[in-house]
Amino acid sequence: MQLSNIFEGLTRCMTMIGGLFLDRDGVLIPERGDYNFLAEQSILLPDVGVALAMLKPYFQHFIVITNQSGVSKGLYSHDDVSMMHNSIQRQLAEYEVQISDFYYCPHAVAVSKCFCRKPDGIMIEKALSRFHLPASKSVMMGDMERDILAGLAAGVHTVKITSNDRLEDFIPEILEKIK
Ligand SMILES: [Zn+2]
């Protein structure tokens, strides 16, 4: 086989790996039925690190997609959001897992109109475009109906879990979607 054919095959293979989009609260960290913005609220749910480490070979990027309307409501700041995300990143580093980016919508329906807030798909669409990810090989995973609607709006596969569920249990379903 010619070297050029091998590279072509490799490139085709690599471009067929997509992104795993993750809702934050209820998927990575506990959904408490209230806003998470304190350091102690950024503790990962059990087995999140292990589950993402197992999924790592199947996705080019892990990307968080989260609504954080508490920013617009003045309950916490952009710095608080960054602190939470840095903490999540540090905890995942122990499993050699990295979140490529955190997309969050800081807007609140009552305060300001926007086009990014889930169930809109724009945050996912932005990430697909920025990281050159094929939608057909990408999955949005979340615990809310709006996560699923956002995924469908962006044209990616969707996996719905119940809040604070064990991610490991959903690995077969996720992999089935991108087969
Ligand atoms: Zn927004």
Image (spheres, rainbow, N blue to C red):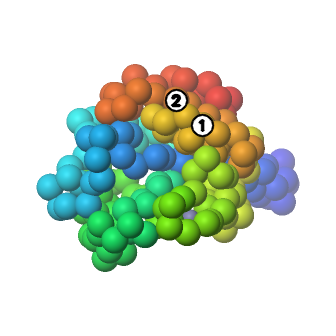
Is disc 1's CB within 8 Å of ligand 1?
A: no
| Contact? badges 2 and 1 (CB < 8 Å) | yes
Location of residue 155 with respect to 66 vertically, above or below: above
Q: Judge whether residue 147 can be spotted in this image.
A: yes
> Could you say which is closer to the camera, residue 35 or residue 17?
35
Location of residue 131 with respect to 8 vertically, above or below: below
What's the CA distance linking mark 2 and mark 1? 7 Å
| Residue 54 in the figure: left or right of residue 137 | left
Position of residue 81 measured from the top left corner of the image (x, y, whole percent)? 33, 67
At horizontal 30% and vertical 40% (from top left) the residue drawn is 33
Position of residue 149 measured from the top left corner of the image (x, y, whole percent)? 64, 39
At horizontal 40% and vertical 49% (from top left) the residue drawn is 24
Location of residue 146 with respect to 102 vertically, above or below: above
Q: Amino acid at mark 2?
A: Lys
> Could you say which is closer to the camera, residue 157 or residue 31?
31
At horizontal 56% and vertical 41% (from top left) the residue drawn is 146
Q: Of the numbered discs in the image, which one, if any, rests on residue 160? A: 2
Location of residue 161 with respect to 124 vertically, above or below: above
Q: Quadrant of the C terminus?
A: top right
> Could you say which is closer to the camera, residue 103 or residue 33?
33
Q: Residue furthest left?
A: 40
Disc on the earlier residue, 2 or 1: 1
Q: Residues within 10 Å of mark 2 (few under 14, many from 20)?
A: some
Q: Amino acid at mark 1?
A: Ile
Residue position marked by numbered label 1 in the rendering = 148
At horizontal 55% and vertical 69% (from top left) the residue drawn is 112
Q: Judge whether residue 90 can be spotted in this image.
A: no
Q: Ligand 1 sits in which quadrant? A: bottom right
